[in-house]
Image (cartoon, grey):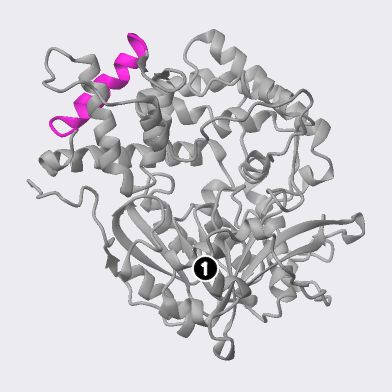
């Protein structure tokens, strides 16, 4: 039944968005940005930045239900007289804030791209500065619910507590999420994107999406194939699998983390002493993980408090580090010092310098901790991540089956199976939206210019096979492969960056079969031993 939804031919009542008669949209009214949002921008570049709030329909099919606001930031083209148009950016997530993405454009794009395009970042619906989706009224309620969620439940009591907390989370969202909760699918965001395209005066969309942003891009080109000018997707999902089978998608996504860790540990051994964790790195890592599970956590000195490294902390930290090859040497140092702490008799080493602060510094995307809050502090976060994923990804599993699923995944994928089984597969079955309006295909609408894809061989979060599938599923696409670790590549490879610039400016598509390399290899000081 789920698979058939995307195959129903449009009727008068379910017309595809591009078939609906276009209505004139109001232009964006740009104004000054909050000065605090432009800290670090050189003074001579400040006049290039402007910001806006723009209203779009809550429900594009029923615009009379009201509007929500989208927050946008624009960095004007360096050479306005040669401007091609606007370049919209989405960093992924879902739930990632793209509002300030134009500020980091110099680190991503070649100078000629900045010369020819206005760069536009935006917070999608439900996210941050846009009308946020919030499931709690107070921080205290949020902390109470999230505090009962174990990141890696093993004991039956922890599993039961986590399942109850996830159910409670869904109930809070049902109570406080409001009407926006029913309109958080990627289809909704793609339709917002088309309204924004018109509102900035572009006849066709130029867009770069990273990670989840590749699903947004793929959805857009299939809803609006004739409105796509140049679309780059970096770090691709498998849209067909993601929109039809949430459990299988997340299982294969978990497999990508396993492949990336295997490759990282093999590279560590191959580079020898350039990687401090070298020497049967795979065996050492497994022994370290097993020690944390079966013997207990490791306590590190910290300021002001000691820092406890348990299995969940290790797993989450390693998963985050695999996104960014720039921290691979640092990760190896931490792993080696942890290994030495549990093997003092076989490890010749000086007194450890490993502290809680060093460990936390490595944790990708982990906050140092929330500031002290007062009673009934207003809840200022948003809950867009699950709102999007649980709208897009169908899950037919029962929450009661998650412990068995986690056991199964752990046998199949020992490093990350249990950890990621307790993500969306555990949370989405109790999500309160039961009939989301999501786009589930077909994915093969043909665009005039091929969609340009980039895929890393050892991407943990969106494994390379997903990029290959995206290239086959889209109606007109070209894949550039990258012999690289890490999640997404633009900004880290001159090869890919030049290809992207030529494509964005001149609509030039690279030849088939190109393989790029990153500018800097992991463990750059290494002399490979194999």
Assign a secondary structure to mark 1: loop
Above or below residue 445? Residue 101 is above
Q: Residue furthest right?
A: 64
Residue appearing at x 50%, y 81% in the figure: 115
- Vertical relation: 360 (above or below) 185: above
The correct choice, above or below, for 326 with respect to 112 in the image is above
Image quadrant where residue 281 sits:
top left
Residue nearest the observer in this picture, 413 or 15: 413
**Counting other residues with Cα less than 10 Å from the Cα at mark 1, is it few (<14), some (14-19), or many (20 or more)?**
few
Compared across the picture, whether 68 is left or right of 450 comes to right
Tell whether position 377 is magenta. Answer: no
Per the rendered image, the range of residues in magenta is: 277-296
* Residue at 14 percent of width and 23 percent of height: 349
Residue 416 or 465: which is nearer the viewer? 416
State yes or no: residue 280 in magenta: yes
Asked where in the image residue 7 lies, by quadrant, the reply is: bottom right
* Residue 146: percent from left, percent from top: 63, 24
Rendering coords of residue 19 (x, y %) = 76, 73
Residue ID for mark 1: 42
Vertical comparison of 136 with 126: above or below: above
Residue 329 placement, left or right of 173? left
- In the picture as drawn, the residue positioned furthest to the front comes out as 43
> Camera-side residue: 392 or 9?
392
**Secondary structure mostly taken by the magenta-highlighted segment of the chain:** helix
Query: How many labels sit on residues?
Result: 1
The quadrant the N terminus occupies is top right
Residue 503 at x, y percent in the picture = 44, 78
The outermost residue toward the left is: 529
Furthest toward the bottom, the residue is 81
């Amino acid at each position: 039944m789920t698979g058939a939804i995307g195959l129903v031919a449009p009727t008068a009542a379910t017309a595809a968005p591009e078939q609906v008669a276009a209505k004139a949209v109001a232009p964006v009214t740009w104004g000054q940005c909050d000065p605090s949002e432009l800290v670090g921008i050189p003074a001579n570049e400040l006049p290039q930045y402007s910001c806006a709030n723009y209203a779009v329909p809550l429900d594009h099919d029923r615009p009379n239900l009201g509007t929500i606001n989208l927050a946008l930031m624009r960095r004007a083209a360096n050479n306005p007289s040669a401007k091609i148009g606007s370049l919209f950016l989405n960093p992924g997530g879902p739930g990632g804030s793209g509002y300030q993405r134009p500020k980091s454009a110099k680190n991503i794009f070649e100078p000629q791209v900045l010369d020819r395009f206005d760069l536009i970042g935006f917070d999608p619906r439900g996210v941050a500065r846009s009308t946020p989706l919030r499931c709690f009224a107070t921080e205290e309620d949020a902390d109470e619910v999230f505090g009962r969620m174990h990141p890696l439940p093993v004991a039956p009591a922890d599993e039961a507590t986590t399942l109850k907390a996830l159910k409670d989370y869904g109930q809070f969202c049902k109570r406080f999420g409001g009407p926006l909760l029913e309109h958080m699918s990627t289809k909704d965001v793609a339709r917002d994107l088309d309204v924004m395209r018109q509102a900035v005066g572009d006849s066709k969309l130029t867009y770069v999406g990273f990670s989840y942003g590749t699903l947004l891009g793929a959805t857009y080109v299939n809803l609006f194939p004739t409105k796509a000018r140049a679309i780059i997707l970096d770090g691709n999902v498998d849209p067909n699998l993601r929109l039809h089978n949430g459990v299988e998608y997340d299982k294969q996504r978990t497999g990508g983390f396993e492949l990336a860790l295997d490759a990282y540990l093999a590279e560590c051994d191959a580079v020898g002493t350039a990687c401090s964790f070298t020497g049967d790195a795979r065996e050492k890592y497994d022994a370290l993980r097993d020690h944390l599970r079966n013997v207990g956590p490791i306590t590190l000195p910290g300021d002001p408090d000691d820092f406890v490294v348990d299995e969940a902390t290790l797993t989450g930290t390693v998963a985050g580090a695999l996104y960014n090859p720039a921290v691979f040497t640092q990760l190896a140092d931490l792993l080696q010092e942890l290994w030495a702490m549990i093997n003092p008799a076989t490890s010749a080493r000086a007194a450890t310098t490993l502290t809680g602060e060093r460990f936390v510094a490595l944790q990708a995307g982990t906050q140092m901790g929330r500031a002290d809050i007062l009673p009934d502090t207003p809840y200022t976060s948003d809950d867009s991540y699950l709102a999007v994923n649980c709208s897009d990804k169908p899950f037919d599993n029962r929450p009661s089956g998650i412990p068995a699923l986690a056991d199964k995944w752990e046998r199949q994928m020992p490093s990350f199976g249990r950890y990621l089984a307790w993500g969306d597969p555990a949370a989405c079955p109790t999500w309160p939206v039961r009939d989301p309006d999501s786009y589930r295909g077909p994915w093969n609408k043909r665009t005039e210019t091929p969609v340009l894809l980039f895929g890393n061989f050892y991407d943990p979060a969106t494994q390379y096979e997903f990029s290959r599938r995206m290239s086959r599923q889209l109606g007109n696409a070209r894949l550039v492969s990258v012999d690289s670790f890490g999640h997404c590549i633009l900004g880290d490879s001159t090869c890919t960056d030049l290809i992207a610039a030529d494509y964005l400016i001149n609509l030039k598509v690279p030849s088939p079969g190109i393989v790029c390399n990153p500018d800097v290899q992991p463990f750059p000081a290494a002399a490979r031993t194999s």
